[in-house]
Image (cartoon, coloured by chain):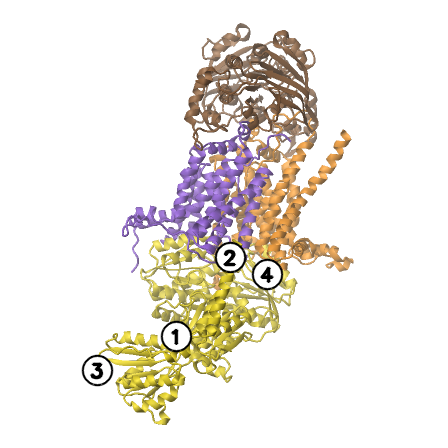
Chain colours: A purple, B brown, C orange, D yellow
């Protein structure tokens, strides 16, 4: 009677879940990578994600238009990013504390808006899983193993993974990326070459926040298709941690996000398979392994030298 | 190719004349520039001379758009211009090479050059184009720079070349050089002077900030001397003497000659025996280094920056692991002891990067005076600090070493570079060390302070202190050392008696020519 | 000239002190907009908020009760930041501290006289918190693991450890007997309850009612907080004493000197012969110890039993950061800032109840307050920099910046 | 832009007005809406096919309105068609019908024609046809006639070939009334009746009784249009009701399509009768009492074939399946549950609707939720999560709101503080409420206990309640704290039994938060229930380690499905994520605590709903009797603290097994044995 489980099926399940779980982390952490590479530590990612999740959901709920929802989420992120920018770039506030302030604001506002505009947990038809059908009868999603792993995710999941090379390209291969890296490393030098340090930081933080908004939307209109208060449940903070894990490189963030998510998927399977490991211990696994992975000795890129340091030209 | 024929090789119009008129710049409590008039023309190298704090940098920052003047105006070819930011000044064709490198550490030379410039392939970077142009410029001006190299891996001299490339690349019609030679070897200085002269010949205007009189005579056409924010005078370099300039700058008579009285050399205080060390990439940075420093002796370590001076000092101070070999202090082997143990054993160390490694900027003067010894009585009793003694100690050193500070509670960051160096010197000498390592003790320090520091070092020598003087300033080495060790690539090229060697010979050794050691 | 400057100086000081107040007001004005949109009267709401936090006996007591963990966690945060490490792990350290305190109390608490049991319980919490703090410290010092990352992860681990213990080894036997499986421990022996203020007042023989002293109005409320039965416990006194001790530690001892030196400039500290790595571990350990102490005090003073970890830590790991930074990372500044910030939190809650407006609105407004207050810091700093009486032009190091930096240069990466 | 929208609005209004006026002037456009005109239209008959074979049953029906009236006529016609299908299609049974027979004379002639034409069963589907029928029937002794609505077969007139049939419309009306009262927020219901007689009156009387039964304070406004087909007037009546504050409407006869249109436009709920009207307005037509004439017709035909041509009186009831209640998905589960309970009780006779209508019987008590008399009370609720968490906090809040709705705001003053995961804050909330004079302060979280025991003694005349807990603090000398505890293992067990019935793969997944407390109880009971049915079924359990990690819960659900699970359950507010997955993957979900079906009406197949009302009322009444605490209250299936709600789409045997388990737990014959995990 019992369903037979092969090891292959389990591995497949783990990888599939891991990829999907990584989606919000990728958006948020890659976005945060931009902010941090420009020298701004945005601890408010969690709050931005919540706002993005809410506005994305609300828009889809009201209009049914997913793209509009995505735009709304990004827009909410942009607004939050601008708040963060004004506070921590223009007013040069302590970034750790302003991030916490932004988080509280986002948490409060998203829940408040939810209460006044929705009231109850609702569902929407979000981004569905693509199946990559070549013909009517043949879909790439049906290909054994590969199909499950690679061809049965929602558009936003693919977007998250495509974002990584794109972000790496922008950071490393474009003039704007060079400016971001430079203002995060040595704003005085960049300033002396006529780079608008504040401008670049504004843009990087705001872009990062827009991505954090999309990260929230990836939960509310792609992975879960519901909105619930505080639904990100700490993901934003994990995303910040993943930026450190990834040594401020998009590919490093990718490795971190995948490691964390795959281990999270693994721990779910450990529980499901009744391996006699207490659930709490299983739940701990991704956190422990993330720390251990960083403890492994390998060469890491240095933290952006000007991270958390406000820049002013020194003229009072 | 068109550019080659133009007066300015970059194709930019030359700046015939820049005039700064009546520039006033105030900082709270300080009048940094007091109605300063200054001008420079195409093809001219105009020196700006003055002690630290005389207002040279402030004036140039006004010109470069980093500061806004409170009064006065800047005329470019007769037309008043407003420079609000480096962007504006770059647009006007003004470039500046700063006293401290304005380089982003962890990216390549080409990226540093490309930063802030429009790419030919926006939004993508065109580093290949930039690199090609860098090579072109390198070839033209003889500036050896690899465009692909990462800045953090470059020696100081190379970084200076990158700075010059950056300016050249932007085709600066007017180039402001803020103490560009502070970190260069004599040969390198000569090399960049060639470039500067070439640039002037091409029609660039150059402003050269320095307090090294030799260089001013070697390079510039005119010299303006600033003191306390005012112009003391402007002279044609050819019509003025060194002594005259020095007096204008300091406002009193200065002696430029050091007198090294004969001292009785005592026992060996420091002895290194075949010391080897590697960096984190496992590349050797010190190779079979052996020498000794005796009581009453100043041993100078000469060498181009990045040839092992810093690892040598750090090995002795316990900050860098010795891979093999032994290190003896007063006969005791102290290889690979902790810095604290070395200090306890009688070492004092004036680190090269004083703001970075020598003081804690946010600590007060008094707090900085006890950085090594806070834990020992009488500075502390048990775990509690003895504030009364600390205060007395600080007060005594401030007056003994003539440290100019509003009070002993003033944060060190509000002190001038020279006074910070005096503070460090005071702290290190007050510890009554058996051995002193003084790394670049006068870099970036004005003449007055330099004079004072040199005098102190010599006085200590007279009292039997063994001193290892690491400096990239050959004049300083020559002026103070009894013996000179030349390092190249982590190896000792030779240990020579100061009185038996010329600057030229040292220069050759610094470039890698070995001399039989003279002990 | 000098007269002019002195005058400026005084008014600047005043302005600096007023600026945060102005910031709070500005934030509340923006918050008023949100309140209006929610159909609430902002004036009434804010009256409820401040009246609720400070205006009466229970409000005052609640505020002070809340300030205790804020203060203790804030002290830990301040030590870490002063030592150049960022401790986002107070949440977890508080939890494990509470766990060990509880374990000790339930297992052995009854074997000791009350005062000694309390003392040992507090030490147990500190010890466990210290261990939990030391782990990221060691990881950073020895292996270069960024402490922001590791402390965030350690928080989650602490929560799960808590759940594991509370639903297994440490669960209240009564819960097992009743079959409800609620994850909380048995109650600690009553002898281990930290005395409440009212108990202390009785011990001291103070009149039990404000009316006995002829006090009326607000004075009666204030006196009532001290003597009448409220939840205010002696942990508050402990926290204030500990704040003073931490001040002494940081500014009067060689240990504090070393911690601050390393935090401000690890390079110079290393050059001066200090062991930077061990100092970072020490800072994290001390930081964890105070967070652990916060956990212990919450258990012994307030909850008397351990339950759901996140309910015990209750976000103090984060709000403690805010309290610490509002207090300028100065142990003595943290005392008033914890009380004020605690008051804001308590008042926000009271506003919710008084006005029946969603609690989340107060969270949003508090977020605004934080944002506005940190923003105005800019003006204070700007003026301070101007005030610095420089005899010479700003030297190479005179670039203004916040002191001390939240994130120091990576010493080990 | 603005101009355009104005034009649009004006056009719309004009169109509506025109439509309404046109209706009133009864333009003879649509047959169903123009009764007078209908007389002129020749009776539409189905052309009889070639001489029918002997086995072919020929049935004719004469009806007052059209077969598409969404009401009375359509109900019988649809039934006939179904009977036809059941019997083997047109070859086995022939149907003829004449619609729009408003004019009784015309109807009589149609009846006679059919009888003369050799139809075996002629149905006169209208009360008004009776007299004519009794005149015709004796002329065709071998023909069976049927008359409805009626209970008179004409026996006393010596007629033996007439069946009578009626629908006990008051039964469904009662159920609808219960539901309507529960769904209404305004407390005002509107009824659009045709003529105050017959079936319509029955239905309406039942509806009013049901509504008042569910909520004595509810106001039911009844209006009759005096016509069966005056759609426009019905629409107007509906409008009027809405203006009078009604937010749930019902009505009968074919006219109601007009009223439904208005309801749809105004967004108020509609409850239908006779035919399923949900197709008209799926969003608002939320409940229907559907007449199912199939068994009746089949029985008539059987009797006819057996030579018994009449004399039987048929009655459509809920019990015999002639009346069926159809509820839309996504309704408030508590309301539906109440309606279902009423339905059950009508079926088992606990509720006699007629007796209630006539005022002879008070509602029966057994298992029914009762609202005892209470004094005004002020209740404060301190919640760890939000009132919209679809779980723990929402369940008690909903129950309190229900009580408040029932008793009125002047009787129950309700305040709440949510998101109190910080225990210190919760404690200060508890104290504030107590100090503020609230009579009953509920600390709705296991973690609040110690604080509560400190505060409670300071307010000896205030009742406090603490749950989940079994400790009233008696040991500490506290006397005014109630402890309450949902025995989640009971509902879990029933869910487990149901899950075991539903699984095909033999694997069931549980998405838990933390393996402790309520959640652990639920899982333990669930596993016991599953394994009571089949010990070989694998129950895979995973915990997310958090109560709010929606994303991880979703992933856990996916993992379970990947591991072969085809039934899922779980608890805490995080499960909304898992339910989303269940919905997407089409896997049934068994809910607990609050009603989660709005999220996925098809997937949430059953819910162990926490109904806090009995517990709350016990506490309120105890407090009002001067006993301020000390009781440990449990929410069990037996005391109505937990209610199992089953979705309609469940297989009957599965539900039966679950109900048996419910019964077993209630009567104690089932003991839940927790397996070691």
Q: Are marks 1 and 3 in contact (CB under 8 Å)?
A: no
**Distance of mark 1 from mark 3, alpha carbons?**
35 Å
Q: Which mark is residue D5?
A: 2
Residue under label 1, please give it.
D31
Residue under label 4, please give it.
D452
Q: Residues within 10 Å of mark 1 (few under 14, many from 20)?
A: some
Which numbered disc, 3 or 4, marks the residue that appears first in the sequence?
Answer: 3
**Distance of mark 1 from mark 2, alpha carbons?**
35 Å
Residues at discs 1 and 4 both on one chain: yes
Please state the chain letter of the residue tagged with numbered disc 2 in the rendered image: D
Is C101 drawn above or below residue B151 in the view shown?
below
Q: Are marks 3 and 4 in contact (CB under 8 Å)?
A: no
- Where is residue D469? Give x, y as percent: 52, 63
Residues at discs 2 and 4 both on one chain: yes
In screen coordinates, is B136 left or right of B450?
left
Residue D142 seen in this snapshot: yes
Which numbered disc, 2 or 4, marks the residue that appears first in the sequence?
Answer: 2
Residue B423 seen in this snapshot: no
Which numbered disc, 2 or 3, marks the residue that appears first in the sequence?
Answer: 2
Residue under label 3, please give it.
D54
Residues at discs 3 and 4 both on one chain: yes
């Amino acid at each position: 009677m019992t369903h037979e489980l092969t090891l292959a099926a389990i591995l497949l399940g783990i990888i599939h879940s891991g990829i999907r779980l990584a989606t919000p982390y990728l958006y948020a952490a890659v976005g945060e990578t931009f902010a941090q590479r420009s020298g701004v530590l945005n601890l408010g990612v969690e709050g931005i994600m919540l706002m993005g999740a809410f506005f994305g959901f609300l828009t889809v709920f009201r209009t049914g238009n997913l793209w509009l929802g995505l735009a709304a989420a990004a827009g909410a992120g942009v607004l939050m990013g601008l708040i963060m920018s004004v506070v921590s770039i223009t007013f040069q506030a302590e970034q750790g504390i302003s991030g916490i302030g932004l988080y509280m604001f986002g948490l409060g506002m998203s829940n408040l808006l939810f209460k006044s505009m929705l009231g109850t947990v609702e569902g929407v038809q979000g981004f569905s899983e693509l199946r990559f059908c070549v013909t009517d009868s043949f879909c790439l999603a049906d290909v054994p193993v590969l199909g499950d792993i690679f061809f049965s995710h929602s558009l936003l999941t693919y977007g998250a993974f495509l974002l990584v090379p794109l972000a790496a390209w922008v950071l490393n291969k474009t003039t704007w990326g060079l400016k971001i890296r430079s203002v995060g490393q040595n704003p005085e030098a960049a300033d002396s070459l006529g780079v608008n340090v504040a401008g670049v930081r504004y843009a990087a933080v705001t872009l990062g926040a827009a991505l954090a908004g999309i990260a929230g939307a990836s939960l509310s209109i792609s992975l879960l298709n519901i909105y619930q208060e505080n639904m990100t449940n700490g993901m934003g903070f994990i995303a910040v941690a993943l930026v450190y894990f990834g040594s401020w490189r998009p590919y490093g963030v990718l490795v971190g996000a995948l490691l964390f998510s795959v281990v999270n998927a693994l721990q779910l399977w450990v529980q499901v398979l009744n391996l006699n490991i207490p659930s709490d211990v299983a739940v701990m696994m991704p956190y422990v392994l993330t720390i251990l992975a960083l403890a492994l000795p390998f060469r890491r890129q240095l933290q952006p030298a000007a991270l958390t340091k406000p820049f002013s030209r020194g003229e009072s | 190719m068109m550019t080659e024929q133009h007066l300015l090789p970059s194709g930019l119009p030359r700046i015939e004349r820049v005039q700064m008129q009546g520039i006033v710049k105030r900082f709270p409590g300080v009048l940094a520039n007091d109605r300063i008039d200054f001008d420079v023309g195409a093809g001219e190298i105009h020196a700006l001379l003055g002690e630290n704090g005389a207002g040279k940098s402030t004036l140039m920052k006004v010109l470069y758009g980093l500061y806004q003047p409170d009064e006065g105006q800047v005329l470019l070819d007769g037309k008043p211009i407003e420079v609000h930011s480096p962007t504006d000044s770059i647009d006007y064709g003004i470039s500046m090479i700063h006293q401290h490198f304005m380089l982003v550490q962890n990216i390549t030379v080409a990226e540093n050059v490309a930063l802030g410039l429009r790419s030919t392939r926006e939004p993508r970077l065109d580093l290949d184009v930039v690199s090609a142009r860098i090579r072109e410029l390198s070839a033209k001006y003889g500036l050896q720079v690899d465009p692909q190299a990462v800045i953090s891996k470059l020696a100081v001299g190379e970084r200076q070349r990158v700075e010059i490339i950056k300016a050249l690349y932007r085709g600066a019609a007017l180039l402001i050089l803020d103490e560009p030679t502070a970190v260069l070897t004599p040969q390198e200085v000569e090399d960049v002077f060639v470039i500067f002269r070439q640039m002037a010949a091409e029609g660039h205007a150059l402003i050269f900030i320095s307090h090294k009189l030799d260089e001013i005579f070697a390079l510039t056409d005119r010299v303006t001397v600033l003191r306390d924010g005012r112009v003391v005078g402007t002279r044609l370099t050819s019509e003025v003497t060194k002594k005259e300039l020095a007096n204008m700058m300091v406002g009193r008579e200065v002696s430029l000659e050091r007198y090294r009285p004969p001292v009785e050399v005592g026992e060996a205080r420091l002895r290194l025996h075949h010391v080897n060390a590697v960096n984190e990439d496992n590349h050797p940075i010190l190779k079979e280094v052996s020498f000794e420093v005796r009581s009453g002796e100043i041993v100078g370590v000469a060498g181009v920056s990045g040839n092992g001076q810093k690892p040598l000092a750090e090995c002795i101070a316990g900050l860098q692991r010795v891979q093999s070999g032994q290190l003896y202090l007063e006969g005791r082997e102290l290889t690979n002891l902790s810095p604290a143990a070395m200090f306890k054993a009688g070492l004092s160390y004036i680190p090269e990067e004083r703001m970075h490694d020598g003081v804690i900027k946010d600590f007060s003067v008094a707090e900085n005076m006890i950085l090594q010894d806070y834990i020992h009585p009488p500075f502390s009793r048990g775990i509690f600090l003895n504030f009364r003694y600390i205060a007395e100690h600080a007060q005594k050193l401030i007056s003994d070493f003539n440290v100019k500070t509003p009070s002993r509670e003033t944060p060190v960051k509000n002190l001038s570079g020279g006074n910070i160096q005096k503070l460090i010197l005071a702290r290190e000498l007050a510890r009554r060390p058996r051995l002193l390592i003084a790394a670049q003790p006068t870099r970036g320090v004005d003449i007055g302070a330099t004079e004072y520091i040199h005098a102190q070092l010599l006085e200590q020598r007279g009292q039997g202190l063994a001193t290892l003087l690491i400096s990239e300033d050959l004049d300083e080495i020559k002026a103070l050392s009894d013996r000179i060790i030349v390092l190249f690539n982590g190896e000792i090229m030779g240990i020579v008696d100061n009185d038996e060697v010329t600057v030229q010979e040292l220069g050759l050794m610094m470039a890698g020519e070995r001399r039989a050691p003279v002990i | 000239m000098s007269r002019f400057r002195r005058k400026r100086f005084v008014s600047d000081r005043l302005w600096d002190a007023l600026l945060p107040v102005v910031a709070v007001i500005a934030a509340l004005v923006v918050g008023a907009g949100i309140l209006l949109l929610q159909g609430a009267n902002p004036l009434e709401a804010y009256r409820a908020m401040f009246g609720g936090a400070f205006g009466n006996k229970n409000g005052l007591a609640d505020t002070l009760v809340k300030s205790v963990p804020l203060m203790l966690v804030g002290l830990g945060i301040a030590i870490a930041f002063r030592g150049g490490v960022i401790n986002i792990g107070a949440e977890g350290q508080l939890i494990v501290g509470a766990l060990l305190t509880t374990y000790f109390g339930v297992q052995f608490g009854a074997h000791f006289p009350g005062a000694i049991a309390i003392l040992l319980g507090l030490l147990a919490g500190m010890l466990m918190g210290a261990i939990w703090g030391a782990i990221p410290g060691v990881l950073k010092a020895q292996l270069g693991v960024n402490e922001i990352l590791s402390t965030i992860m350690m928080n989650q681990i602490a929560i799960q450890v808590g759940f594991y213990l509370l639903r297994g080894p440490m669960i209240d036997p009564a819960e097992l007997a009743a079959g409800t499986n609620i994850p909380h421990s048995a109650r600690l022996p009553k002898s281990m309850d930290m005395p409440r203020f009212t108990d202390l007042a009785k011990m001291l023989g103070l009149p039990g009612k404000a009316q006995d002293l002829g006090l009326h109005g607000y004075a009666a409320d204030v006196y009532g907080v001290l003597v009448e039965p409220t939840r205010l416990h002696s942990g508050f006194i402990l926290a204030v004493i500990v704040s003073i001790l931490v001040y002494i530690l940081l500014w009067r001892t060689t240990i504090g000197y070393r911690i601050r030196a390393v935090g401000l400039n690890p390079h110079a500290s290393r050059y001066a012969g200090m062991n930077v790595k061990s100092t970072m571990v020490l800072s994290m350990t001390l930081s964890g110890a105070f967070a652990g102490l916060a956990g212990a005090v919450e258990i012994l003073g307030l909850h008397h039993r351990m339950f759901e970890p996140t309910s015990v830590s209750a976000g103090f790991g984060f709000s403690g950061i805010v309290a610490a930074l509002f207090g300028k990372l100065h142990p003595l500044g943290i005392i008033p800032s914890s009380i004020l910030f605690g008051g804001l939190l308590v008042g926000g809650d009271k506003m919710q109840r008084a006005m029946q407006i969603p609690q989340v609105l107060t969270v949003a407004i508090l977020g605004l307050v934080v944002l506005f207050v940190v923003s105005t810091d800019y003006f204070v700093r700007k003026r301070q920099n101007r005030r610095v009486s420089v005899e010479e032009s700003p030297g190479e190091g005179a670039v203004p910046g916040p002191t001390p930096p939240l994130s120091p240069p990576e010493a080990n990466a | 832009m603005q101009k355009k929208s104005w034009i649009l609005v004006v056009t719309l209004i004009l169109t509506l007005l025109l439509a309404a006026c046109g209706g009133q002037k009864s333009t003879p456009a649509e047959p169903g809406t123009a009764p007078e005109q209908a007389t002129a239209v020749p009776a539409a008959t189905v052309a009889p096919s070639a001489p029918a074979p002997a086995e072919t049953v020929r049935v004719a029906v004469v009806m007052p309105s059209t077969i598409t009236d969404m009401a009375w006529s359509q109900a019988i016609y649809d039934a006939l068609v179904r009977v036809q299908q059941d019997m083997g299609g047109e070859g086995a049974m022939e149907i003829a019908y004449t619609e729009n027979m408003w004019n009784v004379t015309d109807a009589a002639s149609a009846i006679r024609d059919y009888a003369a034409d050799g139809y075996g069963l002629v149905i006169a589907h209208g009360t008004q046809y009776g007299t004519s029928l009794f005149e015709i029937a004796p002329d065709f002794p071998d023909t069976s006639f049927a008359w409805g609505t009626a209970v008179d077969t004409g026996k006393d007139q010596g007629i033996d070939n007439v069946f009578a049939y009626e629908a006990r419309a008051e039964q469904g009306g009662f159920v609808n009334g219960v539901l309507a009262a529960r769904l209404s927020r305004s407390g005002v219901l509107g009824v659009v009746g045709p003529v105050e007689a017959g079936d319509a009156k029955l239905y309406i009387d039942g509806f009013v009784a049901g509504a008042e039964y569910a909520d004595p304070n509810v106001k039911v406004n009844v209006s009759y249009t005096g016509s069966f087909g005056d759609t426009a007037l019905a629409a107007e009546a509906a409008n009027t009701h809405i203006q009078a504050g009604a937010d749930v409407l019902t009505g009968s006869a074919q006219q109601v399509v007009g009223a439904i249109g208005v309801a749809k436009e105004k967004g108020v709920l509609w409850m239908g009768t006779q035919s399923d009207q949900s197709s008209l307005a799926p969003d608002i037509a939320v409940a229907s009492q559907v007449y199912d004439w199939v068994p009746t017709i089949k029985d008539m035909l059987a009797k006819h074939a057996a030579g018994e041509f009449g004399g039987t009186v048929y009655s459509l009831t809920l019990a015999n399946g002639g009346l069926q209640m159809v509820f839309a998905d996504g309704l408030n589960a508590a309301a539906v549950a109440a309606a279902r309970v009423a339905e059950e009780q009508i079926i088992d006779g606990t509720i006699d609707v007629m007796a209630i209508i006539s005022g002879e019987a008070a509602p029966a008590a057994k298992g029914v939720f009762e609202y005892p008399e209470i004094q005004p009370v002020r209740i404060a609720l301190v919640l760890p999560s939000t009132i919209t968490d679809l779980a723990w906090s929402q369940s008690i809040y909903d129950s309190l709101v229900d009580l408040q709705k029932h008793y009125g705001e002047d009787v129950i003053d309700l305040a709440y503080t949510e998101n109190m995961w910080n225990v210190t804050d919760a404690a200060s909330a508890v104290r504030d409420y107590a100090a503020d004079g609230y009579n009953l302060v509920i600390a709705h979280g296991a973690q609040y206990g110690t604080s509560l025991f400190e505060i409670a003694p300071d307010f000896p005349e205030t009742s406090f309640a603490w749950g989940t807990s079994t400790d009233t603090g008696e040991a500490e000398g506290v006397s005014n704290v109630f402890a309450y505890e949902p025995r989640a293992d009971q509902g879990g067990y029933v869910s487990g039994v149901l899950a075991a019935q539903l699984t095909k793969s033999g694997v069931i997944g549980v998405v838990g938060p933390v393996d402790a407390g309520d959640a652990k109880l639920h899982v333990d009971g669930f596993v016991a229930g599953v394994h009571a049915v089949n010990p070989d079924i694998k129950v895979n359990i995973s915990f997310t380690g958090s109560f709010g990690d929606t994303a991880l819960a979703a992933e856990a659900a996916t993992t379970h499905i990947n591991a072969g699970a085809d039934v899922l359950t779980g608890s805490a507010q995080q499960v909304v994520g898992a339910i989303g997955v269940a919905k997407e993957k089409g896997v049934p979900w068994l809910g607990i605590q609050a009603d989660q079906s709005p999220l996925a009406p098809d997937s949430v197949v059953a819910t162990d709903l926490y109904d806090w009302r009995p517990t709350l009322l016990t506490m309120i009444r105890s407090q009002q009797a001067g006993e301020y605490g000390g009781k440990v209250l449990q929410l069990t299936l037996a005391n109505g603290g937990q209610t199992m709600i089953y979705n309609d789409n469940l297989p009957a045997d599965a539900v039966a097994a679950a109900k048996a388990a419910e019964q077993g737990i209630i009567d104690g014959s089932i003991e839940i044995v927790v397996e070691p995990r």
